[in-house]
Image (cartoon, rainbow, N blue to C red):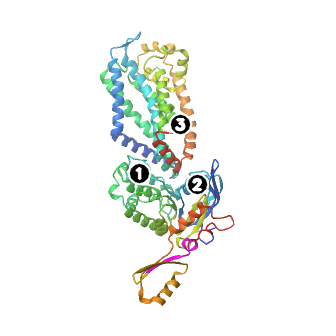
Amino acid sequence: MNATKNAIKTGLQRGWHEFVLSLKSPQDQGFYLFMALVILGYLWFNRNNELEGTGLMMPAFAMPSILGGLIAFGLVIGPGYSLAMEKEDGTLLRSKAVPHGLNGYVTGQVVLHSASLVPSLLVILVPSMILFEGMMSNGLSGWLTVLWVTVLGLAATLPIGIVLGSVVPSVQKMGTWGFFPIMALVGISGIFFPLQGLWTWVQWLAQVFPIYWLGLGMRSAFLPDSAVVVEIGESWRTAQTVIVLSIWAIAGLLLAPRVLARMARRQSGSAVEAARSEAGQWVR
Amino acid sequence: MATSSGTPAVIEVHDLRMRYGDNDVLDGVSFGVRKGEVVTLLGPNGAGKTTTIEILEGFRMRSAGNVTVFGTDPAEAGDEWRSRVGVVLQSWRDHARWTPRDLLTHLSRYYAPYSTPVRPRPYEVDELIHMVRLEEQAEQKIRLLSGGQRRRLDVAVGIVGRPELLFLDEPTAGFDPEARREFHDLVHRLTDLEDTTILLTTHDLDEAEKLADRILILAGGRIVADGTADGLAREITREAQVRWSRNGEHFVHATPDATRFVRDLFTQYGDEIADLEVRRATLEDTYIALVHSYETGVESESEPAFGGAER
């Protein structure tokens, strides 16, 4: 068999194995549970708030947006942390030491983080559907929209996570390089409240990034057409959503392999050792 | 150069230089390793052992010099080359949730396309687990392995592709004596049965003496000695120590020709001699002498590096 194909097949198995290990891990189960409790709690305490002018209750509006935000957040921060950690703990170097190992490693990362999206969305989606009324207004076509928005959002954001994990100098720096910027972007992207309340330049800025469009796409999937009045231009802007997310996906697919390869070239035993002792040195 | 005999050279290094800023870590290193040889790289911390090995592994760019491994520059080598080379990395904390069996099975799959009738790749995972004596831990999480078990797993990962050339960077750090002995047996097995060429670094001089066909000593970015453990000892510290007792009194004498000295001793005193002990210079004596002479700058440009090392 062709060695590259063989490596990609091995990487698919790797990603699935890591996903299963993650589901079995109390650490990761705890993370899913914590996230679900926080988000469902937020929705629960706002269950009687009506979104002005739409007749919609808060959970119905917020849940789709949060799903969109979670996709972006999980697929940027998830691979970012994975790569940052696996640069430091030697996983990446081990992959580099076997023929076509990096092909397998990257394939594994894509599978792992794509698959991990399923439980992290389900722990929000399923209880919400049970706890709150009128969550899905569009039936089957709505669910199909959820599917394509998820897939396109995945393609748009996962490469950003891989680039982030490649360039971040250490796991400790993930906060300032990854976590806080993403949280700030989530804050201005209309996930927790409509975008229109913000200054115009902030609205423009938010619309450059995929998070806003993921939220919008999800709202278009779940909410009734009457809810479109709170959106910019009173439109779901489906064509723009596809275009913006596709541009991010294509740019990411072009950039991520190059950045990753550049980072991987610099990996060596002593580089890992240096990063490790650096990480252990809290006081400088 | 050491590549003069008929056996093909696996590694050839000529005038290798590595510079970080103003600091020359490697300052003109040259050596060769032939097929089937076990070569040990010794040297004090910071002498450039790891740098040298990482350049040969293709993990690090060099500043200057010619390096070939299997006739190819490691810096530009592809995956076919990579499939012939095994690397035992230092132990870290990777794949903590995996079991040894799962990790070895996973990594072994990358080698399947490179199997040949002469050299079937990869190893059977069960055989590998048996070779490094990890049967009992095969299904445990790697996170739960002890330091020595972890290290044995590292060795198994390094040889999973049945490499023709194996790099080992301080393979037995943290081993207890039994694990060390088993590791030595494994190395002998690899060289005898698999015809594997091995380049290893270690700080354990006893280990170097046991394993190596040839020893290279790296100090201050240069190879300051190249030869067998025995050869180096003879070359550098020619005198042996003779200890004996006569009528309850103990004597020590250093002599370049211990055999003649002892014969004379017996001729003169016969049965009065007891507690006879002849101690040749060990590799440790040699090593300390060499590194000391380098560090105090005794050697000069025109002389061989160990010219001033005699005691």
Q: How far apart are marks 2 and 1 (CA)?
A: 26 Å
Crowding around mark 2 (Cα neighbors within 10 Å: few <14, some 14 to 19, many 20+) is some
Quarter of the image that includes the N terminus of chain B: bottom right
- Residue highlighted by disc 3: A163
Same chain check for tags 3 and 1: no
Residue A226 position by quadrant: top left
Residue B204 visible at all: yes
Crowding around mark 3 (Cα neighbors within 10 Å: few <14, some 14 to 19, many 20+) is many
- Residue highlighted by disc 2: B55
Q: Distance between the residues labelled 2 and 3?
A: 26 Å
Where is residue A193? Give x, y as percent.
43, 17
For the view shown, which residue lies furthest in the right direction?
B302
Q: Which mark is residue B103?
A: 1
Q: Distance between the residues labelled 3 and 1?
A: 26 Å
> Residue at position x 48%, y 40% from top?
A84
Q: Earlier in the sequence, mark 2 or mark 1?
A: 2
What residue span does the magenta drawing correspond to? B232-244
Where is residue A156? Give x, y as percent.
51, 31
Asked whether the residues under the numbered discs 3 and 1 touch, taking CB atoms below 8 Å apart as contact, a structural biologist would say: no
Disc 3 element:
helix
**Subunit that carries the residue with mark 2:** B
Q: Does the magenta stretch include residue B239?
A: yes
Disc 1 element:
helix
Where is residue B33? Give x, y as percent.
58, 65
Q: Is residue A265 magenta?
A: no
Q: Label 1 is placed on what type of residue?
A: Leu
Where is residue B84? Give x, y as percent.
53, 59
